[in-house]
């Protein structure tokens, strides 16, 4: 039963770490360019040499 308590505490700690990293990334504008990658894949900017 004590192993179950350890696993629950570790899983809560890991979840809190990921939640903290997500909140940090949102506050530091890591998701600022929401449409950039989806629009870049639509427009092919490769220059073809003949």
Image (tube, rainbow, N blue to C red):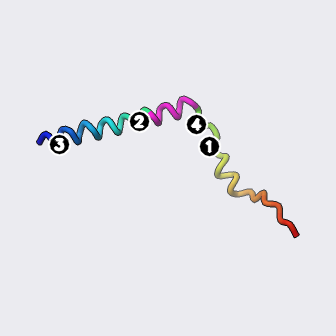
CA distance for labels 3 and 4? 36 Å
Dominant SS of magenta comes to: helix
Which tag, 3 or 4, sits closer to the chain's start?
A: 3
Left or right: where does residue 41 sit relative to residue 10? right
Q: Could you say whether the residue bearing mark 1 is in a helix, strand or loop? A: loop
Q: CA–CA distance between discs 1 and 3? A: 41 Å
Q: Earlier in the sequence, mark 2 or mark 3?
A: 3
Front one among 9 and 23: 9
Q: Report the residue marked by disc 2.
A: 19
Which badge, 1 or 3, is on the more N-terminal residue? 3
Q: Residues within 10 Å of mark 1 (few under 14, many from 20)?
A: few
Q: Which residues are magenta?
A: 21-28
User: Which quadrant is the N terminus positioned in?
Assistant: top left
Q: Which residue is mark 4?
A: 30
Q: Which mark is residue 42?
A: none
Question: Does residue 49 appear to the left or right of 12 in the view shown?
Answer: right
* Residue 34 circle label: 1
Q: Label 3: which residue?
A: 4
């Amino acid at each position: 039963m004590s192993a179950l308590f350890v696993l629950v505490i570790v899983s809560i700690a890991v979840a809190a770490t990921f939640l903290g990293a997500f909140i940090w990334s949102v506050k530091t504008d890591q998701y600022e360019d929401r449409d950039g990658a989806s629009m870049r894949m639509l427009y092919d900017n490769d220059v073809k040499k003949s």
